[in-house]
Structures are given as C-alpha cells and as structure tokens.
Image (tube, rainbow, N blue to C red):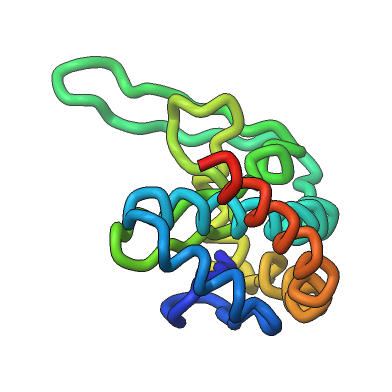
Amino acid sequence: MTGINQQGGSGSSFAIEGMDELIRKIKALPDRTKRLEVLKILRRQMNPIKKAVRDNTPIATRSSSRSVKSVGGQPKRYKYEPENLKKSIGIFTGKSRLMPAVYVGPAMGAKRKYDGYYGFFVIYGTKFMKGDDFVRKAAAPLIQNVTKVMTTDLKKYIDKRIKQL
C-alpha cells in the first residue's frame, strides 16, 4: 500500500510545501478536530492516486476460489471474479491516533463485497508466480503532482473548515 502522512512511516511519504500558514491554523484547533481535518485533506489528495492504482490493477483471466475450514462445520468457499481485485481498491485511514495517515490498496475481508485478500500475493508474488507491485508503480509518478495541484484547493478547504468551526 502507498501512504501519505505528515511524519514519515511506512509507504511513500512527503510533506506538503507552502502550507505554513495553514499548519499554524490547524495547530490552533483541538487535537481531535486536527486529526479529523488532516485525514479529510489526505483522503481528498489520494483520489487521483486511487484512480491510477485502479487503472493499473491487473485483471485475472478467469475466476478463482478458496476454501476456508471452519471450526466444527463445513468448509466455507469464497469465489473471486476476474475484476474483483480492481473493484476492491480503496482509500483506508490509518489507526494511529498520534499520526494521521491514509493508504491506497486492496480492501480485505470476507464480509466485503469485493474482497481483495489475494492482492498481497499479486503484489509480492509466491513461489509459483512473480510479484507485480502495481500499487507503487501507479502511485509513484503522481505523488509529486498531487502535492502541487492540490495545495490551492487544500488552502481553500482548510480556510472554509476553520470558519465553520
């Protein structure tokens, strides 16, 4: 997964330039509000990257399935259609309370409509197939452009949110 955050961490990270005044205004807000506002901004910035990752996601040539043993019952069978991984690409919020971060990658979980559980195997490979890090390939050329293009939009957005609060 590729991420954007304020203080480094896993994934690709960077700082938004020209935001000193906005950062000062954000620091004046309460901690919970600060985190929520920063997350909203980061999620908005990730939309072009999400679209690029979706466009770059490999599509399987046929359906696949897996069987999971359950305790004391019949094995449960999950079926994955060819475009399932592509449809599972989303923007996810990091869990850290101290460092707001968002990530782009396949959504995982059997209860999801599109379970991208096997995205890990596509990205990192297995002993039977070579990995293809389609997420980083799609995100890398856009990360610098996202910061440049979105700075003015972010200034307007933050000013609007501060006036509302």
* 51 vs 121: above or below: above
* 44 vs 82: above or below: below
Residue drawn at the location 67% of the way across and 47% of the way down: 160
Question: Is residue 148 visible from the viewing direction of this image?
Answer: yes
Q: Position of residue 155 (x, y in %)?
A: 71, 63
Q: Residue furthest top?
A: 73
Residue drawn at the location 67% of the way across and 44% of the way down: 85
Q: Residue furthest front?
A: 163
Q: Is residue 95 left or right of residue 73?
A: right
Residue drawn at the location 62% of the way across and 33% of the way down: 80
Compare residues 25 and 131 and report the one nearer the observer. Answer: 25
Q: Position of residue 25 (x, y in %)?
A: 52, 66
Residue drawn at the location 68% of the way across and 83% of the way down: 17
Q: Is residue 98 left or right of residue 134?
A: left
Q: Quadrant of residue 131?
A: bottom right
Q: Position of residue 100 (x, y in %)?
A: 42, 62
Q: Position of residue 98 (x, y in %)?
A: 30, 65
* 27 vs 47: above or below: below
All told, the count of numbered labels is 0
Compare residues 62 and 54 and report the one nearer the observer. Answer: 54
Compare residues 34 and 61 and report the one nearer the observer. Answer: 34
Q: Quadrant of the N terminus?
A: bottom right
Q: Is residue 115 left or right of residue 9?
A: right
Question: Is residue 138 visible from the viewing direction of this image?
Answer: no
